[in-house]
Image (cartoon, rainbow, N blue to C red):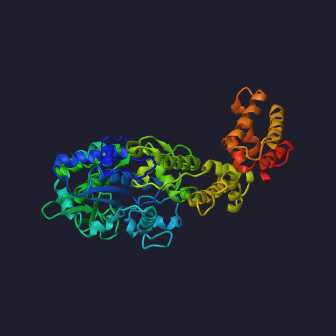
Amino acid sequence: MPADSTTIAPSALLEAARVSKAWPFEEARKIVDRLEKEGETGRTVLFETGYGPSGLPHIGTFGEVARTTMVRRAFEILAPGVPTRLICFSDDMDGLRKVPTNVPNQEMLAGYINMPLTKVPDPFGTHSSFGAHNNARLRAFLDSYGFEYEFASSTEYYKAGRFDATLLKVLEKFDEIMEIMLPSLREERQQSYSPILPVSPRTGHVLLVPLVARDAKRGTVSYAEPDTGEVVEVPVTGGNCKLQWKADWAMRWVALGVDYEMAGKDLIDSVKLASRIYRVLSNKRPPEGFNYELFLDEEGKKISKSKGNGLSIEDWLRYASPESLQYFMFQSPRAGKRLYFDVIPRNVDEYLGALTAYPKQDARERLNNAAFHIHGGNPPTEDLPISFSLLLNLASASHSEDRNVLWGFIRNYAPDATPENHPRLDHLVGYAINYFHDFVKPAKKYRAPSDIERAALDDLAARLDAAPAEASAEELQNIVYEIGKTHEFANLRDWFRALYEVLLGEEQGPRFGTFVKLYGVKETVALIRRALAGEDMSKG
């Protein structure tokens, strides 16, 4: 295979996939093994992701779809010709148990506690219900990324009877399911627990009440209305009942024939319970899957769709490309990750580094490369002249939020680069401006140089002023190193930290020679002179 080719021959691709240690292939091999043990290697394989639309979809929901898609594509390589489907299932028939804190009209929503989410008015006033609003938000996010999936609504599936046969099986196996669930509950909850939740014909509420009678032959359950005590009998079919979510999860796996579903680490015990219920209902092996680590916000707390803490998908897309978000999702899914704004620049540059490395790699290396999984095995060829971090430092030093000004600096470093021949770089310029405006600029803290730093900066300005106009970034970096050594900094890191804090108002920064080449030697000298003169560096 040529080193510069981005196409992997089918035979080499399959061979590499069979031994790849990339986690999507490790997961996909579990599904291949599942089919072989079942003796059904040619049937359609169903992947599922779940979403609870009781709050706005957060970035973790997106991550589950992105990661499941990566496993799906890996499976399709390992089992060519085997059809696959991905269902994104929304539990929108669930009752609203609390009012989210990150939506408008919360007082109005408080009047609809226990109503199915598809019966709760939309607080944003744009859709037929709160559930419909959140479903639409999720689908818009997924569609913007080009994911191939089928959306499924719990309300529609229950009411259309698609779960009826399995719901009758749940009623038949009620006692066995209770034996599984009760030991997992607190004592007070055991007294009222039922895996089957009636939907009150009078109030429309999804009721968390014990059942007073069951009739498996007639397919009905009876309960006492909470406020009147009236005993009401309803069918378990046709959307007249829904299941508690752990039982609901297992029921969906059986009814739909799910082969693979992943879940967060906080749901390990729930997966075990659902798997046991699945076996009771089907006497088969539960779906494959793995438990990923949770995303944490700035304070180290789990992100929540009802609180809206952490990053939203819209947040990320204001500051970085969709592909960089998928890169974040690909990396170490079993390791805990802090998901906040300051993780974005590093992930952008690491994603771009993966793209640059891809053409030079052999088949096995490519299958371990995040770019392969982000782009479905066909990543674009890209080798940008400068990094995103360097663009941020350029915006920081110039205090400019004008794309044309930043492109003028870029051409100092890469004379032939234009927005037309480097559209991805042009996108990065826009992201850098947004990130600089919202985060870098407000957080800048300049300081005056110490005596030793002042002398070194003065020397650096003189040396740069005398440098040849065609000096390379490496030659300029050597000048910076020499100044640090000449002025006997105990640690050269202290010298570079001084450059960043005095000139850029930040604690860390880019390779300084590259920055000088990009920003311009004369411009850098002027920047140093301003700092030495005690000017207000925050005004550009």
Which residue is located at x 60 percent, y 57 percent? 431
Q: How many marks?
A: 0
Specify the farthest residue to the left: 217
Q: Nearer the viewer, residue 437 or 74?
A: 74
| Res. 31 visible in picture | yes
Q: Is residue 316 left or right of residue 282?
A: right
Residue 362's place in the image compared with 69, above or below, is above
Residue 379 % position (x, y): 45, 54
Which residue is located at x 36 percent, y 56 percent? 50
Q: Is residue 344 left or right of residue 245?
A: right
Residue 436 % position (x, y): 66, 54
Specify the farthest residue to the front: 2
Q: Nearer the viewer, residue 10 or 245?
A: 10
Q: Nearer the viewer, residue 180 or 310?
A: 310
| Res. 227 visible in picture | no
Residue 75 % position (x, y): 30, 51
Residue 291's place in the image compared with 435, above or below, is above
Q: Quadrant of residue 256?
A: bottom left
Q: Nearer the viewer, residue 209 or 147?
A: 147
Residue 499 % position (x, y): 74, 39
Q: Is residue 378 left or right of residue 400?
A: left
Residue 16's place in the image compared with 237, above or below, is above
Q: Is residue 390 left or right of residue 457?
A: left
